[in-house]
Image (cartoon, rainbow, N blue to C red):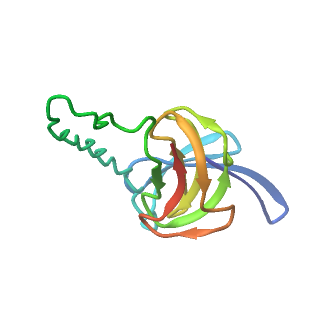
């Protein structure tokens, strides 16, 4: 909802505008509700939910009897890049290198298509590198930070 103050011919008006579906608006002028149709409203972008790729399991090499080869997987996980889902401008970075993060924690705020988008951590871990700063322009797929 957006609130405005207008002064028309010396009269003050308090106006609140709320976009609803398609090209309809709910407009409140000095406490009086109006339902208004507008041809200038672009449809709201629909958030895109992309499925997360499943991890690829690597088969262990067969070990000969009596072999001392180490077939254990490396301890800890590899650094996972957090990429931007769409082009935009970084409005704020909420974490720094060395910070512990939880899956779903808001780590960055991105403005794209005049909308603020929260970028969240995909997993629990520690921020290993922050590759952007406030005010940076990013393209779809750019790496924002690394979490291990």
* Side (left or right) of 20 relative to 6: left
Residue 10 in which image quadrant: bottom right
* Side (left or right) of 81 relative to 32: left
How many labels sit on residues?
0
Residue placed farthest to the front in the image? 66
**Rendered view: 113 above or below 120:** below
Please provide percent x and percent y for residue 136.
63, 68
Image point (31%, 44%), residue name: 52
* Side (left or right) of 17 relative to 104: right
* Side (left or right) of 63 relative to 13: left
**Rendered view: 69 above or below 16:** above
Please provide percent x and percent y for residue 1.
60, 46
Please provide percent x and percent y for residue 94.
67, 46
**Rendered view: 132 above or below 58:** below
Please provide percent x and percent y for residue 79.
47, 48
Residue placed farthest to the top in the image? 66
Image point (66%, 40%), residue name: 99
Given residues 49 and 1, the one toward you in this image is 49
Image point (42%, 57%), residue name: 85
Given residues 58 and 23, the one toward you in this image is 58
Image point (62%, 35%), residue name: 100
């Amino acid at each position: 909802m957006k609130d405005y103050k207008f002064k028309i011919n010396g009269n003050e008006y308090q106006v609140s505008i709320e976009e609803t579906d398609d090209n309809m608006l709910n407009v409140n002028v000095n406490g009086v509700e109006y339902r208004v149709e507008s041809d200038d409203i672009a449809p709201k972008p629909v958030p895109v939910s992309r499925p997360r790729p499943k991890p690829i399991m690597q088969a262990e090499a067969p070990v000969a009897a009596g072999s001392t080869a180490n077939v254990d997987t490396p301890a800890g996980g590899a650094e996972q890049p957090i990429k931007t889902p769409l082009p935009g401008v970084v409005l704020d970075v909420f974490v720094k290198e060395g910070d512990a993060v939880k899956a779903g924690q808001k780590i960055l705020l991105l403005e794209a298509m005049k909308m603020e988008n929260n970028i969240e951590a995909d997993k629990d871990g520690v921020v290993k590198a922050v590759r952007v700063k406030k005010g940076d322009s990013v393209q779809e797929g750019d790496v924002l930070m690394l979490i291990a």
